[in-house]
Image: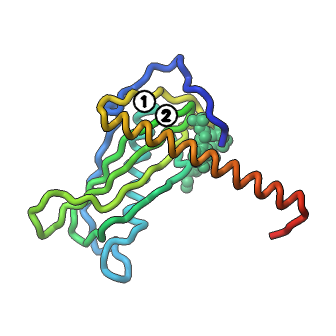
Amino acid sequence: MTDQLPPDSAIEAKPTSASRTTLSHIMTGNDTNLLGTVHGGVIMKLVDDAAGAVAGRHSGGPAVTASMDEMVFLEPVRVGDLVHVKAQVNWTGRSSMEVGVRVLAERWNESTPAQQVGSAYLVFAAVDAEGKPRAVPPVRPETERDRRRHQEAQIRRTHRLARRRAIMELRERRAAEGMQD
Ligand SMILES: CC(C)(COP(=O)(O)OP(=O)(O)OC[C@H]1O[C@@H](n2cnc3c(N)ncnc32)[C@H](O)[C@@H]1OP(=O)(O)O)[C@@H](O)C(=O)NCCC(=O)NCCS
């Protein structure tokens, strides 16, 4: 994971709306955990699928999941619920994109509006045919909400880099002091 490099200014920016995507799926009996509600891993797969579709569309080619963080499950999802996974690019670096995802459920037996049941942030890296990072178009936030998400994503990015650097430094210090795991 590199320190921050400036976005490639030779690539034309793309608006957030150009790649925003919703993936919808009805939950079945195959998706349950021991409690009979939907397994968290099933939701995470849908989140990764939706975010991957957005990252591929924004970057115009293959993109791989580099990290997934702050996955939050707010409410259980049940068999028969119609789940909508809404994803958009919040922020772009040189070759990476932060994708924000909201998970909503329409209850199969209620006519109430879809309820938010989860959210997550994922970082995707755009890669070339050899799997090496390639430059992505900068994202152009269009609304105040997009701009807020862009600013918050920048904070998360700074914290990810700082956390990683701090852990690497700790490991190097421990190794230099001869400590073994
Ligand atoms: C993600 C991957 C391409 C990064 O490659 P790398 O050689 O470390 O390249 P870099 O250090 O230049 O990182 C590329 C970009 O990804 C970002 N990145 C890399 N690892 C990251 C992590 N763990 N979290 C957040 N961002 C990360 C870097 O900050 C960089 O962003 P930038 O270009 O916008 O500044 C590489 O680690 C990989 O292929 N991982 C496996 C991906 C995969 O298979 N995913 C599916 C999981 S089953």
- The spot of residue 163 in percent (x, y) is 63, 51
- Identify the colour scheme used: rainbow
Q: Is residue 86 above or below residue 90?
A: below
Query: Within 10 Å of the Cα at label 2, are there few (<14), some (14-19), or many (20+) other Cα atoms?
Result: many
Q: Is mark 2 within 8 Å of ligand 1?
A: yes
Q: Residue furthest bottom?
A: 34
The numbered disc on residue 167 is: none
Give the labeled residue for mark 2.
92
**Which picture quadrant has residue 30?**
bottom left
Q: Is residue 90 above or below residue 47?
A: above
Q: Is residue 12 above or below residue 20?
A: above
Q: Residue at x 31, y 42 (%)?
A: 21
Q: Is residue 63 left or right of residue 145?
A: right
Ligand 1 shown in quarter: top right
Residue 129 visible in image:
no
Q: Is residue 45 above or below residue 53?
A: below
Give SS at disc 2.
strand
Give the labeled residue for mark 1.
139
Quarter of the picture containing the C terminus is: bottom right
Q: Label 2 amino acid?
A: Thr
In this view, the residue in front, 163 or 33, is: 163
- The spot of residue 180 in percent (x, y) is 84, 68
Q: Label 1 amino acid?
A: Val
Q: Residue furthest left?
A: 111
Query: Within 10 Å of the Cα at label 1, are there few (<14), some (14-19), or many (20+) other Cα atoms?
Result: many
Mark 1–mark 2 CB contact (< 8 Å): yes
In this view, the residue in front, 176 or 5, is: 176
Q: Residue at x 57, y 47 (%)?
A: 159
In this view, the residue in front, 98 or 176, is: 176
